[in-house]
Image (cartoon, rainbow, N blue to C red):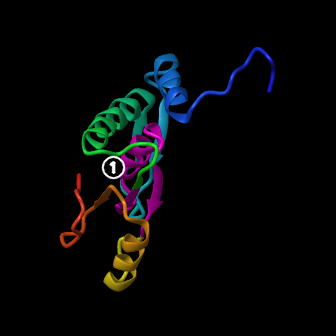
């Protein structure tokens, strides 16, 4: 790394990109069914991730936390993962169709601060 460049965290780099290129596309979400894609700008990603990060921080997520994420291929998955990374947390992506026995064993092992999912029967704080 050049001496005039200092390493920055992922969260800070995302903030920098949102400031430098607010309207440029950060993500394209391409549905499997061939319907219209969704474009997410750097500013939208930054704003949404910060909103989720504030919520996560308020419930105790920090650099010592694990965050389980089980959302189908959707923009909310990116918002949640980015929010967790901004707080320095470990992100554990989990398959949505995971059998309950496997899922519960993984959650018992990980002991996440939060699980972000569309599951109705998980006993952790949830956002979506």
State the SS at label 1.
Answer: helix
Q: Residue furthest top?
A: 4
Instruction: Tell me: 121 left or right of 66.
Output: left
Q: Nearer the viewer, residue 21 or 70?
A: 70
In which quadrant is the N terminus drawn? top right
* Label 1 packing within 10 angstroms: few (<14), some (14-19), many (20+): many
Q: Residue at x 36, y 56 (%)?
A: 35
What is the magenta range? 67-94
Instruction: Tell me: 119 left or right of 80.
Output: left
Q: Which residue is mark 1?
A: 76
Q: Position of residue 100 (x, y in %)?
A: 31, 82
Q: Position of residue 55 (x, y in %)?
A: 26, 40
Instruction: Tell me: 79 left or right of 117.
Output: right
For residue 31, which quarter of the picture? Answer: bottom left
Instruction: Tell me: 4 left or right of 111.
Output: right
Q: Residue at x 33, y 55 (%)?
A: 113
Q: Position of residue 3 (x, y in %)?
A: 80, 18
Q: Position of residue 111 (x, y in %)?
A: 37, 64
Q: Residue at x 40, y 26 (%)?
A: 43
Q: Nearer the viewer, residue 16 or 58?
A: 58
| Residue 90 drawn above or below residue 44 | below
> How many labels were placed on the picture?
1
Q: Residue at x 44, y 22 (%)?
A: 22
For residue 98, which quarter of the picture? Answer: bottom left
Q: Residue furthest right?
A: 2
| Residue 98 drawn above or below residue 49 | below
Residue 89 forms part of the magenta stretch:
yes
Q: Residue furthest left?
A: 120
Residue 80 forms part of the magenta stretch:
yes
Q: Nearer the viewer, residue 34 or 110?
A: 110
């Amino acid at each position: 790394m050049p001496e005039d460049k200092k390493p920055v965290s992922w969260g800070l780099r995302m903030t920098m990109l949102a400031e430098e290129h607010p309207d440029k596309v950060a993500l394209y979400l391409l549905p499997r069914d061939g319907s219209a894609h969704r474009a997410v700008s750097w500013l939208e990603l930054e704003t949404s991730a910060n909103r989720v990060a504030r919520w996560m921080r308020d419930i105790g997520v920090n650099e010592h936390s694990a965050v389980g994420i089980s959302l189908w291929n959707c923009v909310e998955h990116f918002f949640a993962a980015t929010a967790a990374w901004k707080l320095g947390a470990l992100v554990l992506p989990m398959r949505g169709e995971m059998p309950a026995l496997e899922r519960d064993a993984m959650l018992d092992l990980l002991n996440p601060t939060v699980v972000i999912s569309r599951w109705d029967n998980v006993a952790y704080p949830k956002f979506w």
